[in-house]
Amino acid sequence: MERMVKGGKKIILTQGDITELSTDAIVNAANEDLILGSGVAGAIRKKGGPSIQEECNRIGRINVGEAVVTGAGNLKAKYVIHAVGPRYGEGNEDEKLRNATWNSLLRAGEKGCLSITFPAISTGVFGFPKDRCASIMLKTVLEFLETQETTVKEVVFCLYSQEDLEIFKKALEVII
Ligand code: ADP
């Protein structure tokens, strides 16, 4: 599913493994310690090789809602943007998820990326409800694309299952 946004920009929803995508940047659903463990991070570590964790180690720790950039090792993307979403139940989750999304887009723009792919941040180990994640992340992306001067023209969401893709499709239909 694809939706056009003001200025010839696009939001695209797809299903699959985010490590297979060749957008300029892919986003990691990271933790504050930037240790690539399970889920999206585990897949990135396995397929991207050790350089990504090494760069993360040099950066150290970041706060929930922040995002930092590393190279992408052996992945097809040029950059991995490590965004820390909230753990469900910790408080202010909606705002933190919005910040993680917004800051990822800022980082992508700073690197001159034309395209970026997000996973459904916080909806795995961190337990955030998927429909709420979809609504927040999609609204944030739409607002960013409509209001910010950015190199980013294409924002892809890569959902892991068909079911998750359907949740994001429904949310996007409500928003655009
Ligand atoms: P978090 O700790 O932020 O919850 P996870 O990586 O555990 O992050 O999960 C985030 C979302 O990414 C979940 O919906 C999960 O099903 C999905 N996911 C896991 N592996 C992949 C992958 N290789 N590609 C795309 N999405 C994935």
Image (cartoon, rainbow, N blue to C red):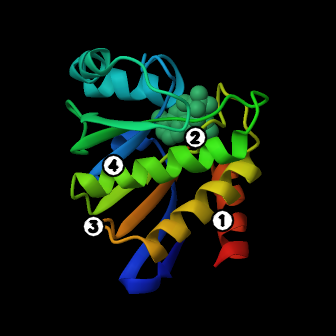
Q: Which mark is residue 151?
A: 3
- Looking at the rendered image, the quarter that the N terminus falls into is bottom right
Identify residue for label 4: 107
Q: Secondary structure at mark 2?
A: loop
Q: Residue at x 54, y 38 (%)?
A: 65
Apparent side of residue 58 relative to residue 94 in the rendered image (left or right): left
Using a 10 Å C-alpha cutoff, classify the residue at mark 1 as few (fewer than 14 neighbours), some (14 to 19) or many (20 or more). some
Which badge, 4 or 3, is on the more N-terminal residue? Answer: 4
Using a 10 Å C-alpha cutoff, classify the residue at mark 3 as few (fewer than 14 neighbours), some (14 to 19) or many (20 or more). some
Q: Amino acid at mark 4?
A: Arg
Q: Amino acid at mark 1?
A: Lys
Q: Amino acid at mark 3?
A: Thr
Q: Is residue 108 visible?
A: yes
Which badge, 4 or 1, is on the more N-terminal residue? Answer: 4
Q: Nearer the viewer, mark 3 or mark 1?
A: 3
Q: Amino acid at mark 2?
A: Ile
**Above or below for 99 versus 34:** below
Q: Is mark 2 within 8 Å of ligand 1?
A: yes
Using a 10 Å C-alpha cutoff, classify the residue at mark 4 as few (fewer than 14 neighbours), some (14 to 19) or many (20 or more). some
Q: Which mark is residue 121?
A: 2
